[in-house]
Image (cartoon, rainbow, N blue to C red):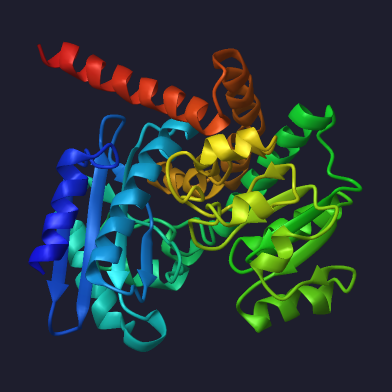
């Protein structure tokens, strides 16, 4: 445990990936709950971000995931113009084994104890029904069912936003926002990916998919026999003639092994934290691959759940998610003018927005 704590403290206090305002370790022995709530920034407002339920290889891995994901949420919410900060939570364990109503209620009590500094929602391993349970113990749970005053499945607008990011990428690279006739590879066709496939097919794209869950692949192929499935992500990224690669599963998809093997000229997907480490964005640029920053294009879901705080209206949310197209083009333009990769350009814009908010708060307090 000492080794884990030392590693976490080093990340928090001594690296650029740290700088979090608050990290809460939560435990309820009666239910088996072990969770981490990480609040990266409240400069723009309460920290909003989902709860990931996952069987991590170690407690240290879980804490570091919460740190990375919450930092990403600060940037995502800043770029989405939501007036919200960034946070994220992880519950440690296999949701198929340990998830119970009592555990979720215990987790809800921890969220409530933060007094609104952190607002939760769904993520990998958690669903609308889970947020309905969590909301019984806290008013700071979004992503609830319509029957319980919520917006329902945020995957719908997440996929829509990624599709807008793809259209913007096509516009920037090929001068036309349509994906008609383009070959798009989607890695992960679960909660978000299967909606993205629908948008792509409607726009006339040729779609290639893969997923670790055979049932997810079968669902797509049964409905759309024209879709091609390949064995794994390694095969997908090497697909001949691939125009766009869409990572839509867990993070770290773009790394030292995958980037050199990519056949696509655009990467635009729903997964969080796609860049495995700093420097990968430059490797992509050096290969002439256009990268649409993940936290920009996958913001449709957070736009949807954030709207619950104001009384949910789907049309209003979809209109905001449509603007991801313009935001993505703005980032590409900034990258070109500054001579930097798009990921760095997006970071600069988001960091400036957070800095301006902190300065405004400081001026108001003085």
Which residue is the extreme one toward the bottom? Answer: 97
Residue 52 location (% of width, % of height):
38, 64
Is residue 310 shown above or below 49?
above
Identify which residue, 181 or 14, lies in the foreground.
14
Is residue 84 in sight in this rendering?
yes
The residue drawn where x is 15% and y is 41% is: 13
- For residue 248, above or below residue 358: below
Q: Residue 129: where, in percent of width, then height?
A: 44, 72
Residue 23 placed where, x, y %?
Answer: 17, 52
Which residue is found at the position 14% from the left and 72% from the top?
27
Number of dots carrying numbers: 0
Relative to the observer, which residue lies in front, 137 or 110?
Answer: 110
Q: Quadrant of the N terminus?
A: bottom left
Q: Quadrant of residue 155?
A: bottom right
Q: Residue at x 29, y 34 (%)?
A: 45
Using residue 53 as the reference point, say whether residue 343 is left or right of it.
Answer: right
The quadrant the C terminus occupies is top left
Q: Is residue 327 left or right of residue 143?
A: right
| 169 sits left or right of 16 in the view | right
């Amino acid at each position: 445990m000492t080794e884990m704590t030392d590693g976490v403290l080093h990340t928090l206090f001594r690296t650029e990936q740290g700088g979090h305002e608050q990290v809460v370790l939560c435990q309820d022995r009666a239910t088996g709950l072990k969770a981490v709530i990480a609040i990266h920034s409240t400069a723009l407002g309460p920290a909003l971000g989902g709860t990931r339920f996952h069987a991590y290889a170690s407690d240290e891995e879980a804490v570091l995931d919460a740190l990375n994901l919450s930092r990403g949420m600060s940037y995502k919410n800043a770029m989405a113009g939501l007036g919200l900060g960034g946070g994220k939570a992880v519950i440690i364990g296999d949701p198929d084994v340990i998830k119970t109503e009592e555990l979720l209620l215990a987790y809800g009590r921890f969220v409530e104890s933060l007094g609104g500094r952190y607002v939760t929602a769904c993520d990998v391993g958690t669903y609308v029904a889970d947020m309905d349970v969590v909301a019984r113990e806290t008013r700071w749970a979004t992503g609830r069912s319509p029957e319980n005053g919520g917006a329902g499945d945020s995957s719908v607008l997440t996929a829509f936003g990624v599709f807008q990011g793809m259209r913007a990428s096509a516009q920037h690279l090929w001068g036309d926002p349509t994906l008609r006739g383009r070959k798009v590879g989607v890695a992960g066709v679960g909660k978000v990916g299967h909606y993205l496939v629908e948008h792509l097919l409607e726009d006339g794209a040729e779609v290639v998919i893969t997923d670790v869950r055979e049932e997810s692949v079968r669902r797509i192929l049964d409905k759309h026999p024209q879709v091609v499935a390949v064995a794994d992500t390694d095969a997908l990224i090497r697909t001949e003639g691939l125009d766009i690669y869409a990572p839509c599963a867990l993070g770290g998809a773009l790394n030292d092994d995958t980037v050199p093997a990519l056949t696509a000229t655009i990467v635009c997907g729903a997964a969080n934290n796609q860049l495995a480490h700093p420097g990968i964005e430059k490797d992509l640029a050096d290969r002439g691959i256009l990268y649409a920053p993940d936290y920009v294009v996958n913001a449709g879901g957070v736009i949807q759940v954030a709207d619950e705080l104001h009384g949910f209206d789907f049309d209003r949310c979809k209109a905001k998610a449509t603007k991801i197209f313009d935001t993505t083009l703005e980032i590409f333009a900034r990258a070109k003018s500054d001579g930097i990769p798009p990921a760095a350009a997006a970071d600069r814009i988001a960091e400036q927005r957070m800095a301006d908010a902190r300065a405004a708060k400081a001026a108001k307090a003085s």
